[in-house]
Image: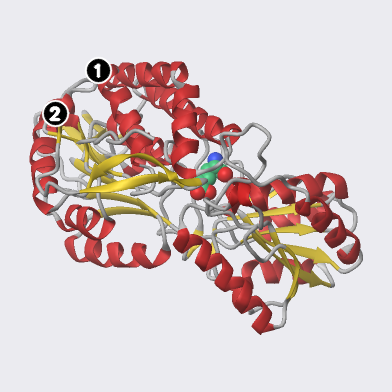
């Protein structure tokens, strides 16, 4: 262990700088808390103020750079990420725990998002439509908005910042990036890539620190007109209140309580692979994680046995070990929360079929590990059926029909992702139509969104915006309309329009 861990800096006003507070926080490996990755700035309001000032200067310049040239920078970003994929994946696993296959996928999602953004620089469509008056053009086009404040979570340390930052930049905005305190190293590596790719320094600012100070100052700052946040529904509500009062543009991506439904005509082996991946991938720490399993009564007992048997054998360990299937939770508080839900489940009358506790044994004793957990006998309305747990906990619910399954799926406050396994076409189309979520998978688990499709949910999951796909370009741009009248006379819309000769 080096006696002096590396001390990292913010990137503000074109330079890597120590925080004005002079304070730092530790970043430790969740699979081995003796592994100190580094010290990162615990920034304060004055750091944010300086970042905003600089970002405003960056915006003046970047917003005038032609979009295809902005796209070229994003192309280079994608290339650099591809070159550094392995190194970034390893750094990511070390600081947040998910297995290497998944952190490689996380970087790949960033690469895909960069290449998509690069090509969008030559599109960014507006519309030219016929005017109702003669000798007049009517058209709309996209303009950048200003400084965008991005607040991102720990579970996708590269992909989610990429989902937000790349389209924001492509549209001509400047960005202030506030990553989760658990994953500051990946954020640092991403900003290095952006700068090396040729992004003008004032256009990107990286400010580390607690959400309650850095995030809050950014959200309340009058010169940050756009905020994008992925995180808890509670924090999203506070941000939403401030943005509402200040008339800011806000994209919220929050909780989920996603279900997989398995019908009697499903390929059960296929469903089994999907459920294990959906529930225990990323140790259940995805907003799209499968946290409910709704089983038709005809296959309930058999499929529950199949899930328990396989889930029990999943290999827990440090994500850097290629044999590991399930890594640790992110920190102590997360593990306490998961454990408390197991207690709640018992009190509510559910049964802990497998797991329900931290693993024994010395090998894992210095990490925030928790055994894959299956709760049987869960009924609609129980807290473990309604609330987001964000851990490796699967609540199993028995139903008597497809109608009941759809009702149970829909009867939660969230609506991000859902999935149904069946071999019947009619059942599949019923599910696609009636499952009330932003995303539905047929014969695949609730996770696995692709970068070029819109990502987001209904109800308490979001506020109607989408990330990914083309839709996000709408969020990060302002539509302006231009009319050009070259008739040489005053033509009044709605009044001088009626003679068709
Ligand atoms: C999240 O669940 O927090 O669909 C983001 C997926 C990923 C992104 C998930 N591509 O699982």
Residue toward you, 65 or 150 = 150
Q: Is residue 130 toward the left or the right of residue 259 in the image?
A: left
Name the residue carrying label 1: 198
Label 2: few (<14), some (14–19) or many (≥20) C-alpha neighbours in 10 Å = few
Residue that appears at 53% across and 54% down: 368
Residue that appears at 55% across and 32% down: 105
Q: Is residue 181 above or below residue 340?
A: above
Residue that appears at 51% across and 56% down: 457
Assess whether mark 2 and mark 1 are in contact (beta carbons under 8 angstroms).
no
Q: Earlier in the sequence, mark 1 or mark 2?
A: 2
Q: Is the distance from the Cβ of mark 1 to the nearest ligand 1 atom less than 8 Å? A: no
Q: Is residue 84 above or below residue 395?
A: above
Q: Is residue 379 above or below residue 159?
A: below
Q: Position of residue 59 (x, y in %)?
A: 15, 33
Please state, as top left, top right, bottom left or bottom right, where the N terminus lies in the image. Answer: top left
Label 1 – label 2 distance at C-alpha: 14 Å
Element on which disc 2 rests: strand
Label 1: few (<14), some (14–19) or many (≥20) C-alpha neighbours in 10 Å = some
Let me know if residue 257 appears in the view.
yes
Please state, as top left, top right, bottom left or bottom right, where the C terminus lies in the image. Answer: top left
Q: Is residue 45 toward the left or the right of residue 272 in the image?
A: left
Residue toward you, 46 or 61 = 46
Tell me the number on the disc at residue 15. Answer: 2
Element on which disc 1 rests: loop
Task: Name the image quarter holding residue 8.
Answer: top left
Residue toward you, 360 or 489 = 360
Residue toward you, 224 or 376 = 376
Q: Position of residue 99 (x, y in %)?
A: 58, 38
Q: Position of residue 468 (x, y in %)?
A: 46, 39
Front disc: 1 or 2: 2
């Amino acid at each position: 262990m080096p006696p002096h861990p590396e001390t990292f800096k913010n990137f503000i006003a074109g330079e890597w700088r120590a925080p004005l507070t002079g304070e730092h926080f530790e970043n430790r490996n969740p699979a081995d808390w003796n592994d100190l990755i580094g010290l990162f700035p615990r920034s304060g309001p004055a750091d944010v103020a300086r970042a905003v000032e600089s970002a405003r200067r960056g915006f003046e310049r970047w917003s005038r750079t032609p979009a295809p040239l902005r796209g070229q920078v994003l192309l280079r970003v994608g290339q650099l990420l591809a070159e550094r994929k392995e190194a970034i994946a390893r750094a990511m696993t070390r600081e947040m725990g998910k297995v290497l296959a998944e952190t490689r996928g996380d970087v790949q999602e960033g690469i895909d998002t960069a290449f998509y953004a690069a090509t969008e620089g030559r599109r960014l469509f507006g519309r030219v439509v016929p005017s109702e008056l003669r000798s007049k053009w009517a058209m709309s086009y996209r303009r950048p908005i200003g400084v965008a404040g991005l607040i991102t979570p720990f579970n996708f340390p590269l992909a989610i910042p990429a989902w937000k930052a790349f389209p924001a930049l492509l549209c001509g905005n400047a960005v202030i990036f506030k990553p989760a305190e658990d994953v500051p190293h990946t954020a640092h590596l991403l900003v290095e890539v952006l700068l090396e790719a040729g992004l003008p320094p004032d256009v990107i600012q990286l400010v580390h620190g607690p959400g309650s100070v850095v995030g809050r100052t950014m959200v309340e700052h009058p010169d940050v007109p756009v905020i994008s946040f992925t995180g808890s529904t509670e924090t999203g509500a506070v941000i939403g209140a401030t943005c509402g009062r200040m008339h800011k543009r806000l994209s919220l991506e929050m909780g989920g309580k996603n279900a997989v439904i398995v019908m009697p005509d499903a390929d059960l082996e296929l469903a089994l692979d999907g459920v294990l991946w959906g529930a225990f991938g990323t140790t259940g720490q995805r907003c799209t994680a499968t946290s409910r399993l709704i089983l038709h009564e005809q296959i309930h007992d058999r499929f529950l046995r199949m899930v328990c048997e396989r889930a029990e054998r999943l290999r827990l360990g440090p994500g850097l070990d290629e044999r590991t299937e399930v890594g640790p939770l992110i920190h102590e508080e997360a593990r306490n929360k998961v454990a408390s839900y197991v207690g709640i489940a018992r009190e509510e009358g559910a049964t802990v079929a497998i797991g329900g506790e931290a693993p024994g044994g010395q090998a894992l004793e210095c990490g925030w590990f928790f055994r894959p957990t299956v709760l049987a006998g869960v009924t609609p309305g129980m807290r473990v059926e309604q609330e987001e747990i964000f851990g490796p906990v699967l609540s199993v619910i028995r139903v008597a029909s497809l109608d009941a399954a759809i009702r149970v799926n829909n009867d939660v406050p969230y609506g991000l992702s859902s999935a149904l396994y069946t071999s019947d076409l009619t059942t599949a189309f019923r599910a696609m139509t009636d499952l009330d979520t932003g995303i539905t998978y047929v014969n695949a688990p609730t996770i696995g969104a692709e970068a070029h499709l819109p990502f987001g949910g209904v109800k308490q999951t979001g506020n109607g915006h989408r990330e990914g796909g083309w839709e996000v370009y709408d969020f990060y741009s302002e539509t302006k309309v231009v009319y050009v009248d070259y008739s040489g006379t005053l033509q009044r819309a709605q009044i001088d329009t009626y003679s068709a000769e």
